[in-house]
Amino acid sequence: MKQNRVLVETKSGRLQGIYEDELYVFKGIPYAAPPVGELRWMPPQPVKPWSGTRSAEEFGPICPQDTTPTPVPGRKPSEEPQCEDCLFLNVWTPAADSGKRAVMVWIHGGAFIHGSGSTPNNPGKTLPNRGGIVLVTINYRLGPLGFLHLKHVTDDRIPSTGNEALLDQIAALRWVQDNIAVFGGDPDNVTVFGESAGAESIGALLAMPQSKGLFRRAILQSGASKSQPVEKAVMAAERYLDKLSLTGKDVGALRSLPPEAFIKAQMELAASGTPGVSAGGLGPVLDGEVLKEVPLDAIERGSARDITVLAGSNLEEGKLFALMAGLDIQRMDEDNMVRRVRQLVSEQYAAGLIENYRAALATRDLPVTPYEIYAAIQGDQHFRMPNIRLCEFQEKFGSQSYGYVFNWKSAAPGFGACHALDVGFIFGNLIEEFHGCSPEAQRLAENMQDAWIAFARIGDPSCPGLGTWPRYGSDRKMMVLGADSRAKTAPYDAERAAWDGIPNNILG
């Protein structure tokens, strides 16, 4: 008979977990000191060891954030407690023994301003129960608390680079290296996986020397490269200070303001359409210290050559963002579409991309309205092309890479194979209104889970339900995941080819 409680001894002290859903679960484990007061915007500091036994039966609070829900049918807004003291992680394991199981570390998405490692939308029990792996999920600092570059505007009084959240993720991965063995995991077989901002975070980690040796494999779902020039980050910081009626000299006020003040400023600036502070304007910064170059540029030069990767995207990523933008964008005319594409990729590349996508969509008998062309280009620019180039660059160094395209269509009209649709399949949390819950949907979910688990275990996502998953290789073989999953050579290649010659820094 399983015990309802279990004790483990970590490097920081003893933890008491709980047995639930046929797994041993440890929640709310601190992996760094609370980033509050003088530690706000500082790199994560070590946890202060505790005496006695610390309960790990409840999730820790999540980073302060706006909880306005996205228009995903059936998804409820987060009701998790929020606090600036948020650097916690969670572990699900079949047994806290010496089993040396494969470890999967989930880095959540949410545009760098939303999300947590404990959201009920991504239940932690699914992958460990199905595949016998150890799962770790993490919180990290978000929005202006994790990505605000204050170094320049405060004349180094607050030396934040704007990449403190990436350093949080590295601190969590170091905790895994130091402690996961007592939870039944193998520190030499760690896979990081994430979606959207989580995948873009992993792309940054692949470019950073600080992450060397912390993981062996990486799964990047919808994103692989995201960064902004330091000049843009400085402008964003200036706008925050202006919104808060502060200057760079008001260091005491910046460190003492309640976190809610920064979230309120973020929401107001984003609502006003202020450049650089929208959901996509806060994220990794090319500061020259923590992140020295565009992640894809570093990867192209071999920064991740020792990492095996599985990377892919959803076929119609951009449709979620178009629906979030409202009816105006769906009714755009040709001139509006051209203007928006120029904002995405610059005037130099816009015309060629538009005509190539118009032809590619028409070849597949798809609508070629300005809205459809823009949504396709936007989704591929942000997500699909960075994932494809990651695979291509890894293959150049002889590193194993596996690619996929997820083309399952949402049950909700107009969403198509949109951004974030894949996550419910990985965590076995299908929402009938959004994903569909047919036997075909359930089978796809199980096959994707088995592939992700197999990749984490041995570095090859082949599994019985999908068959052999070939390497990306020079002929661009990818797995198409959907109602008819199968490996194909260079699927949807006309759109990919349209990006040839466009530099990495325009992607993501």
Image (tube, rainbow, N blue to C red):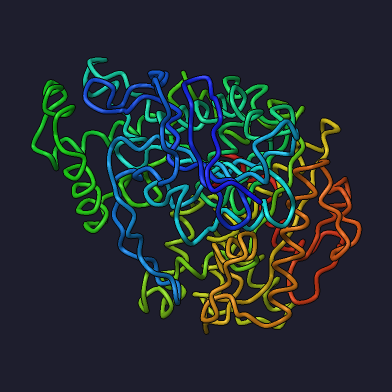
Res. 199 in view: no
* Outermost residue, left side: 245
* Outermost residue, right side: 468
Whether residue 60 sits left or right of residue 296 in the image: it is left
- The number of numbered discs placed on residues in the rendered structure image is 0
Whether residue 507 sits left or right of residue 27 in the image: it is right
Rendering coords of residue 221 (x, y %): 63, 52
Residue 139, image quadrant? top left
Q: Is residue 240 above or below residue 53?
A: below
Residue 294, image quadrant? top right
Residue at 24% of width from left, 48% of height from top? 266
Residue at 56% of width from left, 30% of height from top? 8
Rendering coords of residue 432 (x, y %): 55, 80
Residue 465, image quadrant? bottom right
Q: Is residue 408 above or below residue 406?
A: below
Residue at 56% of width from left, 71% of height from top? 373
Q: Is residue 90 above or below residue 420?
A: above
Rendering coords of residue 4 (x, y %): 54, 48
Residue placed most toward the observer, 437 or 336: 437
* Outermost residue, top side: 156
Whether residue 382 sits left or right of residue 330 in the image: it is right
Q: Is residue 495 above or below residue 264?
A: below
Res. 217 in view: yes
Residue placed most toward the observer, 120 or 252: 120
Rendering coords of residue 485 (x, y %): 80, 70
